Image (tube, rainbow, N blue to C red):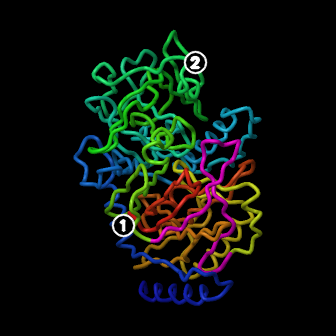
Amino acid sequence: MASLSVVHCLLVVFVLLCGGALAASPRRYLSVTIDNLISSKAQAQVNCYDPDRTMPAAATSGNRLAIHTSCARRPEQSMSQRDILVHDRARLSAVLERSAASGAMPPVPAISFPPISLAPVPGPAAPPSATIPDRPDLETVEFVVVVGFGTPAQPSTLIFDTGSDVSWTQCQPCTGHCYKQEDPLFDPSKSSTYGVVPCGTAACALAGGRCNGTTCLYSVHYGDGSSTAGSLSEETLTFTSSRAFSTFVFGCGTTNLGDFGEVDGLLGLGRGMLSLPSQTAGSFGGSFSYCLPSFNSTPGYLSIGSTPVKGQVQYTAMIKKAMYPSFYFVELTSINIGGYVLPVPSTVFTKTGTLLDSGTSLTYIPAQAYTLLRDRFKYTMQGNKPAPGFDELDTCYDFSGQSAIFIPAVSLIFSDGAIFDLNFYGIMIFPDQTQPAVGCLAFVGSPAGMPFSIIGNTQQRSTEVIYNVGGERIGFVPNSC
């Protein structure tokens, strides 16, 4: 019966995806076997970052640094649908908080979220790591890199964030408060290259110009009430074994409030002048790229500067928005699902713009577009067993008993003709380890009050995303890691 079900699903997909409005992309459907799905999840846990064990070999050399997800300490800490929704709500609220605090622009109205109806998930209060901002009840898989501060280099595990400018790490002595982290705290007294940024300098002005005597101070507040503060400092940042940056300006955090998980701090990759790409622009042109690891055996990577690209790059324009000076926007205009272009005016997307974000899990699109996408997805998925939804994740299927899963391919289309082809795991998400064969469409309708669409990190997984800041364009290279 299982084999007949698979054949039936394939025939339905084939017939349905050959109809409708056709686009240039030849892709009609994607597939994965159930065995591959389950083994890939197990392999992803092998390649995650755990400071308590030896990591698998990864490509860390030159300008390239390995990216790992963080490891769950126990099976019950695995990410669930509830974790994703709560995480994204904290992230979206923080994005608006940063916009209101970034300049003289008026504050943006708060996003109106419906209540989450899932029962509480048992487990410890503190997650193994968390994207800033985050909350104590989250147990979310995040992306981390390991860099070195000081001479000799002291390792620091940092979450990288395309929506933040100031990089920071917890420092000794903790005159205020430091949360628990796995690595030893960075000790400036053990570095021969550490120094504080003096008052009256350009770097101090960029950080707000606050001082304690002659020492410049920094402070960053996040949307959930978490914060970090301390001395704005200069130090040698060791990126890889063959690449280090001197006089890198960062926050040496001695008062860090809230729950940031067990990571040491944050690596800022935003568009502001204190971000890593901006500080290294003289040497590397302000360019960087990353490939977030998907469910396979390969870790991801973060590269500073231009690097050789394997595969065809689809470039689209990098858009600036005055109200969000640190963020990277693109101009999404339409979505192709299985060769069928959604019949929605491009202005539905362009009137608000689309944020490309490393810290948001799912992709949020206008309600009108999401309804059409969801309905078309359901249409092509006839023959599969529907599963109960999880609040905003309202389109789910139980693939138990099937040997393979077939879904319509999805591509994001931009105003200049660039196309971003999503892979299987950028369309379907399987977040619940207790129900490994239950998958949900990884798109959500934007909640009321949300001022733009967002392309989240689920859709970016396994794709090299190239940020050519000087050239003001963003490139996509699918299947790169």
* Numbered range of the magenta stretch: 312-341
Residue shown at 45%/31% (left/top)?
Answer: 168
Examine the rendered structure and indicate whether residue 130 appears above or below residue 339. above
| Closer mark to the observer between disc 1 and disc 2 | 2
Residue receiving disc 1: 38
Location of the N terminus by quadrant is: bottom left
Picture quadrant where residue 253 is located: top left
- Determine the residue located farthest toward the left in the rendered image: 54
Residue shown at 53%/27% (left/top)?
Answer: 203
Q: Residues within 10 Å of mark 2 (few under 14, many from 20)?
A: some
Residue receiving disc 2: 210
Q: Residues within 10 Å of mark 1 (few under 14, many from 20)?
A: some
Left or right: 423, with 98 as reference point: left
Q: Nearer the viewer, residue 98 or 78?
A: 98
Spot occupied by residue 167 in the image (x, y as percentages of width and height): 47, 35
Specify the amino acid type for callout 2. Arg
